[in-house]
Amino acid sequence: MNDHGRKSPSETMIAAAKEKTFECHVRSRSAPNGSVTVVHLRAASPEEVIQQLLKQGFIVVSVKIVTGMGDYLRSAFGLDTPGGLRAFSFMNRVSSAELIFFGTQLATLVKAGIPLLRSLEIIWKGNANPAFREALEKLRKRISEGSSFTGALRESPDIFPWIWANLVEVGETTGKLPECLTEIVHYQESANRIKGKVVTALFYPGILAVAVTAALTFLMVFIVPKFAEIFREQKMTLPAITKVVIAMSAVMRSQFPLVVAGVVAGVIAIFQLKKTPQFRASLDLFALNVPIFGELSLKVAVVRFSRALGTLLCSGVPILQALEISGKLVDNKYLENQIGIVAKAVKGGQGLGVQLEQRKVFPVFMTQLLSTGEESGQLENFLNLIATYYEESVDTFLSRLAVLLEPVMLIFMGSVIGVIVISMFLPIVQMSTSVGQA
């Protein structure tokens, strides 16, 4: 007779292959203020690790996947422990990774039947970030005073994004708080993933641009004037290109403080004007029309909108409220305004996909899929499909952009520096040639 409750050897091997190694920082529940201990466990997910540690009587401080030798080295030197780099004041902020882990912990504890206040206390005792501990303490205090979890979250908008309060409100209303917390974690992970891809792709070109700009400034402010002084003393006849470079250097030296002050004033003015909805919308519309980067901005906005709307609808948020929240999470005032117009049309009974297509701000492929999802009654599934498709498209786009940007920037900036260097040595070469001919 077959034992249906026991896994076959092949199933066991497949399950083991899916497991990952997790590095866990824990404290003993009997000594919540004691030292942190590092434990390594193998499991299929962070939730499974947390459940194992809770059953063993630990307070969980942090859990992360061990991906290679670098993780072990960082752990050995204490860089990832609560007493490591995070002890410095400039690290005392609540990162997205900490929010994700907080959501995972809280969902696991509440799902296990532990009351909300007790769950927050357990997480608070195991947290090492002073800023986050303060926020958690504020949550516990407000809830113990009779406030709802949603109301307490809304009092800390600088820590907990707007989507947290709205989904938690749905969870408290429907009695599905663990499920809504899990949806929050999935959304936050997706948002972090797309943000990380953009930052990674533009990091090297950004560093290169800063380095070359510094080199150009040094050449024009300190090196070119020395050559100009030599040329004046020798009363040399200068080529046109040399005269242009020397003139630009003179302007930079004499007007450098004014240029710096102008740039600083311009940046401050833009930041102040961005607080006005009209200017912000115009600036965001301009960003969408910038060659190359405009396409990237639109695809990122599609991912954010689709992922947020799908998450909210899956959690039971009404579509009009979900559209309002999703519009804000797009982080583009122009698109937010367009989504607001669409929401009014949807309120009047119009289809979401059709209205978005009429506004002509999102790709037709996306709006067509939305219409198909509405017609088939599977809008949430199609939203997740759209988000996944465009996230992969962004990844491919960024990979190609990074490959293209690096040589283009190197050639452009090398050419600029080369022109400056050649313009300085050209008069010397001409003078040497004329002396040799004489």
Image (spheres, rainbow, N blue to C red):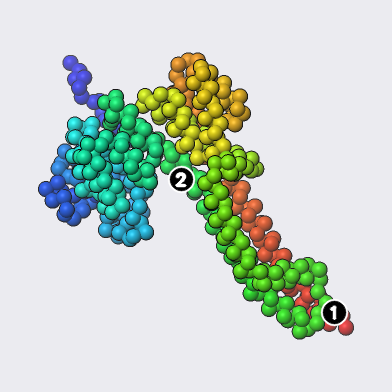
Q: Quadrant of the N terminus?
A: top left
Q: Are marks 1 and 2 in contact (CB under 8 Å)?
A: no
Identify which amino acid the numbered label 1 is placed on: Ser
Q: Residue at x 32, y 40 (%)?
A: 153
Q: Which residue is mark 1?
A: 434
Residue 387: x percent and y percent? 48, 31
Residue 131: x percent and y percent? 31, 52
- Up the image or down, 429 lies above or below 43; here it is below
Q: Nearer the viewer, residue 94 or 265?
A: 265
Q: Residue at x 26, y 46 (%)?
A: 138
Q: Nearer the viewer, residue 416 or 172?
A: 172
Category of crowding for the residue at label 2, using alpha-carbon neighbours closer than 10 angstroms: few (below 14), some (14–19), many (at least 20):
few
- Decide which of tag 1 and tag 2 comes sooner along the chain: 2
Q: Quadrant of the C terminus?
A: bottom right
Q: Which residue is mark 2?
A: 196
Q: Is residue 284 among the parts visible in the rendering?
A: no
Q: Nearer the viewer, residue 222 or 393?
A: 222
Helix, strand or loop status at disc 2: helix
Q: Is residue 415 left or right of residue 395?
A: right
Residue 341: x percent and y percent? 55, 28
Task: Work out which residue is located at the far right of the displayed protein and give it.
Answer: 438
Q: Is residue 316 left or right of residue 217?
A: left
Mark 1 → mark 2, Cα distance in angstroms: 58 Å
Identify which amino acid the numbered label 2 is placed on: Gly
- Count all numbered tags in the image, as a single digit: 2
Which of the labelled discs sits on residue 252, or is there none?
none
